[in-house]
Amino acid sequence: MCRNIVPLNNLEPAATDAECHDAALQYVRKIAGTAKPSKANQEVFDRAVAEIAHATRHLLDDLVTPAPPKNREDEARKRQARSAERYEAIRVFQQAKRAERSDA
């Protein structure tokens, strides 16, 4: 799954239409393999985004859960912490590879 698409269910306040659109856009970009479609494909691309955003809105509106709503700020902090860990691991790996090359 694309890391830019974040879970939108059970948030307080609830997900906005703009967030549904942004998630749909990321999904269509991933599936289409392009961030910007050609002029020939723009209409199809835009239609897919609109349809997926619409379906996403309906999905979120219809889902039920007994769990208490998640706090947006807490969820954002968790995502940032995971990202920092991931990028630190990459940095350490790259540093080790450079050290290996310089020792050789």
Image (spheres, helix red, strand yellow):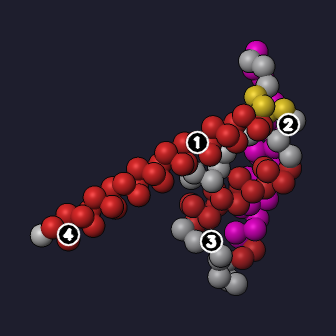
Q: What residue sits right under mark 3 in the picture?
A: 35
- Pick whichever, 66 or 100, lies toward us: 100
Q: Is residue 40 above or below residue 9?
A: below
Sooner in the amino-acid sequence: mark 2 or mark 3: 2
Q: Residue at x 54, y 48 (%)?
A: 84
Mark 4 or 2, which is nearer the eye?
A: 4
- Pick whichever, 102 or 86, lies toward us: 102
Q: CA distance from mark 4 to mark 1?
A: 30 Å
Q: CA distance from mark 3 to mark 1?
A: 26 Å
Q: Which type of secondary structure does the marked residue at label 4 adopt?
A: helix
Q: Residue at x 78, y 31 (%)?
A: 71
Q: What residue sits right under mark 4 in the picture?
A: 101
Q: Which amino acid type corresponds to the residue marked 1 in the rendered image? A: Ala
Q: Which type of secondary structure does the marked residue at label 3 adopt?
A: loop
- Pick whichever, 58 or 16, lies toward us: 16
Q: Which type of secondary structure does the marked residue at label 2 adopt?
A: loop
Sooner in the amino-acid sequence: mark 3 or mark 1: 3
Q: Which amino acid type corresponds to the residue marked 2 in the rendered image? A: Ala
Q: Residues within 10 Å of mark 3 (few under 14, many from 20)?
A: few
